[in-house]
Image (cartoon, rainbow, N blue to C red):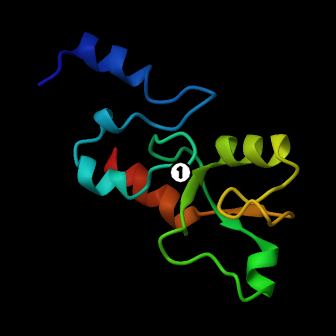
Amino acid sequence: TQSKAEHAAASTLLRDDEKGFNLALFVDREKAKQYQCKLCGQVCCDAVELVCEPCVKSEYKHNDEQEAFYCQTCLSRWLSLNDTKCPVNSAHFGAIYNPSHFVRKRINNLM
């Protein structure tokens, strides 16, 4: 078990402005892994789901393995720096995201 000082030090590492939550800080790491951001590799902070309009309207949709969650900060930065290019299919532009309230609750319950 962690001392109070160790726990306090670890909780400062939970999140920074660049990434999600450190996987090592979760009790059930296997469950937490399913919520890893596909951009930073950490457990999603403020989880969002990608909405790629060209994929919705075309036959070239993302397959189930490509469906993923992202930290809001990571995906927002990606879309801003890449002219709204889809991080899954670089031929698609106009990607947006929606908050994933269900996933956010699941992550909070794992902490």
Residue at 44% in and 19% down = 12
Residue 105, compared with residue 9, is above or below; it is: below
The x and y percentages for residue 70 are 58, 52
Nearer to us in this view, 50 or 21: 50
Image-based side of 42 in relation to 10, left or right? right
Occupied quadrant, residue 27:
top left
Image-based side of 91 in relation to 99, left or right? right
Residue at 85% in and 63% down = 93
Dot 1 alpha-carbon crowd within 10 angstroms: few under 14, some 14 to 19, many 20 or more: some
The x and y percentages for residue 110 are 33, 50
Image-based side of 73 in relation to 106, left or right? right
Occupied quadrant, residue 10:
top left
Q: What residue is pinned by disc 1?
A: 38
Q: In which quarter of the image is the C terminus?
A: top left
The x and y percentages for residue 38 are 53, 51
Nearer to us in this view, 59 or 81: 59
Nearer to us in this view, 81 or 101: 81
Q: Quadrant of the N terminus?
A: top left
